Image (cartoon, helix red, strand yellow):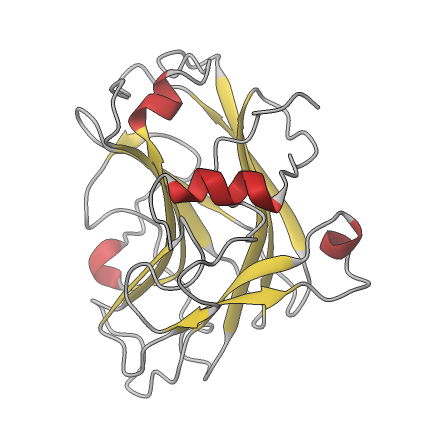
Amino acid sequence: NLSNRNLIINGAMQVAQRGTSSTTSGYGSLDRFKISYSGNDEAPTHSQVDVASGTTPYTLGFRKALRLTNGNQTSGAGAADYQIIRTILEAQDIANSGWNYLSSSSNVTLSFWVKSSVAQNFYGSLRSLDGTGYNYPFETGSLSADTWTKITKTISGNSNLTFNNDTGAGLYISFMPFFGTDYTASSVTLNQWATYSLSTQQPDNTSTWYTTNDATFEITGLQLEVGSVATDFEHRSFAQELVLCERYYEV
């Protein structure tokens, strides 16, 4: 339980300087989390919501979550449609983390709590930005409707990864409740690094969540740490998280 383990800022979804609800494509609600969407019939809503008492995340100290409500996509799942939740890590924070990202025997571990109003499998990814970009797609596995589930992914390094020691964007961590077929392919292999390509970011997506009116997708307790084990979430005070967020945006 050492401090400064979690490389993600605002992983407990405590800070929302811009507001607690938005339909903006970009930053509009929770700090450090960018919501992108395109091709939608109705703009999705992203918001900071309460974690219900009596749930496992609540008992573990989580009081807030990020919720994406998909809107009403009356024309169905278009090939170019997407909705993405993304946090961006500075390259220097990866370069100086202690992860030997060039070695396949050195790992980082991603863990998070997730809940969907629709029972299905979802995909996410890690994507490096420096040098030749590489993509690491993963899945949540089948989620039961309206049930918090903890997901843990251990990710090995790769000799092709590059992270500059600078303030530029180094790593995207993304969750895609829906990606149209312009961005997916049946040939995509999960849980391994591959050269990034816009058209092969994930396996083909199930569209049930996307085409269910006002379906929701929630996440909290997002942690990325060096090592092959998911340790207990590093709970930082609101004041600590606010100061970290204010490096990028300050009201």
Instruction: Please indicate, yes or no, whether residue 168 appears anywhere in the rendered image.
Output: yes
Q: Position of residue 8 (x, y in %)?
A: 48, 37
* Residue in the image at 35% along x and 64% along y: 28
Is 202 situated above or below 164? below
Q: Position of residue 49 (x, y in %)?
A: 58, 67
Is 219 situated above or below 42? above
Along the horizontal axis of the image, is 122 left or right of 85? right
Q: Position of residue 187 (x, y in %)?
A: 30, 45
**In which quadrant will I find the C terminus?**
bottom left
Instruction: Please indicate, yes or no, whether residue 9 appears anywhere in the rendered image.
Output: no
Q: Say which of 56 and 147 sits in front.
A: 56
Q: Could you say which quadrant of the image residue 207 lies in?
A: bottom left
**In which quadrant will I find the N terminus?**
top right
Is 192 situated above or below 84? above
Q: Say which of 203 and 35 sits in front.
A: 35
* Residue in the image at 64% along x and 30% along y: 230
